[in-house]
Each structure stands twice: as structure tokens, then as C-alpha cells.
Amino acid sequence: MKPAYTKLNHDHLQFFTALLGESNVLVNEEEKQKYGRDYTEDFLFVPEVVLLPQNASEISEILKYCNNQRVAVTPRGAGTGLSGGALPLYGGVVLSTEKLNHILAIDEDNFQVTTEPGVINDELRRAVEAKGLFYPPDPASKGSCFIGGNLAENSGGPKAVKYGVTKDYVLNLEVVLPNGEIMWTGANVLKNSTGYNLTQLLVGSEGTLGVITKVVLKLLGKPKTDLLMMASFGDLVSPCVAVSRLLNAGITPSALEYMERNAVEWSMRYADVSLELENDMQSILLIELDGNDGEILMRECEQIYEILEANKCLNVLLADTAAEKERLWKVRRICGEAVHAHSVYKEEDTVVPRFQLPVLLQKVKEIGAKYGFESVCYGHAGDGNLHVNILKGELDDEAWNHTVKHGIREIFETCHQLGGTISGEHGIGLVQKEYLDVVFNSAQIQLMKGIKQVFDPHGILNPGKIFPD
Ligand code: MLT
Ligand code: ZN
């Protein structure tokens, strides 16, 4: 049964306008439509109003009011999410964090940055790099996604194989709870063994427990140099085998990215980048090394050549200029957009222990053949995280809306059997929630619902996400 939320009326809008000013209360249909989408498939859920608060205390007032009035509130970052986390399923308020967009302090002594959630990932990276510091998490959408969205979904990105994901950099959060209370979750320290870890509970909670208004992130020293190679292979699975061999040899690349041929070709076309591809190339691996000593990296590079050669690699290209590296990265980063521009699609963010990746890849193709769908795969081979894009192609609506879902369930069951799970870095949000039972039993789901109930007893915050209906 759908929860009953209060529909907004003139009085509600007047309250918001008095609090935020007219320009921060969007009621125009066109604007509301814009905030009714994110990057997930072609969903549209139009909110009743979009609010643009500028600080934690305004957010506190909004949440307190909506909690009392039982109005649904959907927090939103840049809207680049791929699981539908920012879609306002029940209308109500979209609470955008775009005006909380300041980097508040870079602490060079302690290697920390304090920022608001509406700062773009790449802007934060550049600001800390100017001081010789390094914030590694770099989702494909780093040029537009917000730090707050990265926190909500615990985003990863290519550098995760060496440096970990967003959660590994979060020290402390200022958060507004649904009842309007503003609190810090932890402390600005590298070690913390004090009570339950509220900070990590909030990370990856997809905007369902509280609204993050400030974050303290850990930083590293910036590596001085890097190398990038593109290795091509004549089949689909050999790159994934090579990845395990390479890591087992004691080499830790800063990226190990996989793309199958269609993904490379469609991205090249979409990004207007031309690369020479062998006729029999079926897949590629991008291998990045970083560090402070170029000679050490070159020696590792030679070792990598040998491992690749022993694992059915057709050819290796070493990008020798910054422009060449940029071209290769562009092709990889634009993959999602290129596939999505090519066909109606559903994207699954599968993840398995990385040694199982060749098995998963083969099973994905077998399941596709069984249910009659084509897929294009790319992703973070070093993390066992494969983005499986299922294409509608010539399928009719009945097959697309029903039969394909059985196939998706089978893919997720395979992930679970291999020791993996159903989302590595995109979150459950709207599109994965009907599969949550593949990996969690009812006792586990009840435990999570209990946590939600403690934070948000009236269920006003980001309703309709994570939990199956
Ligand atoms: C990526 O790795 O390219 C991102 O997660 C985006 C996507 O999967 O489409
Ligand atoms: Zn990814």
C-alpha cells in the first residue's frame, strides 16, 4: 500500500517562501520536471516544489515542518545517480543541496578538507591538488556529481582498486535528521572507536536517514606521476583473468578498467575520439599506475607487459602524453552516456570477488542468450565491479518489462552465489529494490527497516527507496 503523504497547498508554499525567499522555491512546471529526473533510465517523477536552501539551519526548518506535516522530502545532489535515488516518487519536496556549494577549509597539517555537500567532486579534487593533496574517489561523472551524492551512494570510480571508495575518506559528518535536529556524527580523527559508527551508517544510506550538510574528508599526498596503458584482447574474459594475475604479482595499479568492444566503439563515436582498434579486438583493459618515482613505474610497466602477453593480450599501447591519456580516459568515462544514448537500457551494478569476474561475465552473456537480451559490459575489473547494461534493442514492451527482469534476477543470484552482491557503487535506490531479497533475508531487511524507523519514524525522507514495496 502506498504511504499517504500530505499534498502541498498554498499555506505550505507560503511557509517555504517566507523561510527561503521566492527565488529559492521553484514551482514552475519546467523547472520541476528538471528535478524530476536523474541519470537513471528515463524515469520522471515530478515534485510539487523544489527547495534550494543555503545552510543547515534552513534545512532543519524544512525537515521539522515537513515531518510535522507528513510531507515527503527527497534530498538531491547533482542528479547524476544511476539507481534513481534522487527521484521524488511521491511528489512532495525535492530538497536540492546545490546552494551548499562551498569548500569550507583545507587543513594542510592534518590532510583534511571540510566541505559542503553541493561541491562538485572534480572541483574539490582540484582545490586540494593545488595544495599538493589528493582526494582519490573519482566516479565517472566526477565533472558534475556532488560530494553529497557520492556520500549518499558511497560512490566508487576507477581509483577504488588502489585507494578505496568514498566511505574510506569520510571522517565526520554534519547531518540534519528528519525531526530537524542538527548533529555531528563523529570526530575529525583518523582513528575512532567510540560507540556505534554513525558516520559510516550515514554514508551509503541514500538520503533515507538524514540530510548531510557538512563533511570532513581525509586526504592523501598527491602522487607525482602516472602511466596509462591500453591492452586489447581477442576475447571477453581474458582481461579479467589478467587482472587477477597482475594483482597477485604484487602490482597495485591505480586503475584497472574493463570495456567490451561495443562499449569502446560507442564511446569513441559519442566522444568523437578515434582510437586504432585491432579487427579481432573483443575487449580492452585500461591500466593506470601512479606513484612518485617514474623509473619504478616503468619497471612495473615492463612486468605488466609480460603478464599481459602470457594472458592472451593482442596489443598494448602506452599513452605517452597527457593528451593521449585524456583521450583514453574520455572514452572510458563517457561509456555510460554513450550506451544510454544508443538504446533504451537497464544498468546493473554487479560486483563479485574479483577472481570470480570471468565467471560472472560468462554467466551474464549466457543469461542474456537464455532470456533474449543483449548486454554491453564495462567497469572496474580490479574491484570485480561490472556494469552490465542490458539493451532493449528489438525487444517488445512485454519482454522488456517482465521477461528481462527474470534475467536480471538470475544475474543477481549468480553474483550472490559467487560471493558478491547487487550494487557495488550505484546504490539500491528505486531500480534495484525489487531484488534486495536476493542478497538479504527478511530478518536482515527488518533490521535495516528498524534503523530507518529510529531515524525517520514518519518515513518522510526519500520514501520508496532501498526497501522492496
Ligand atoms: C562508470 O563506471 O562508468 C560509472 O559507474 C557510470 C556507469 O556505470 O554508467
Ligand atoms: Zn562505475
Image (cartoon, grey):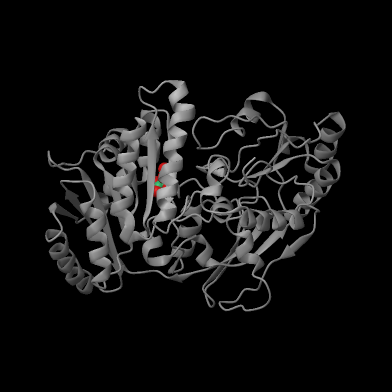
Q: 82 above or below 34?
A: below
| Residue 127 place in picture, x, y as percent | 49, 60
x and y percent of residue 215 in the render? 62, 62
Q: Quadrant of residue 103?
A: bottom right
Give the quadrant of the C terminus.
Answer: top right
Q: State whether residue 205 appears in this view.
A: yes
Identified at 26% across, 70% down, the residue is 248
Find residue 88 and report its image quarter: top right
Residue name at image x 16 percent, y 60 percent: 308
**Quarter that holds the N terminus:** top right
What residue is shown at x 81% (from left), y 53% (from top)? 179
- Residue 134 lies, in percent from the top left, at 44, 66
Q: How far across and how far down the image is residue 112, in percent?
A: 55, 70
* Residue 228, visible in the rendered structure: no
Q: Between 270 and 397, which is closer to the camera in this rendering? A: 397
Vertical position of residue 286 compared to residue 96: above or below? below
Q: Residue at x 62, y 73 (%)?
A: 188
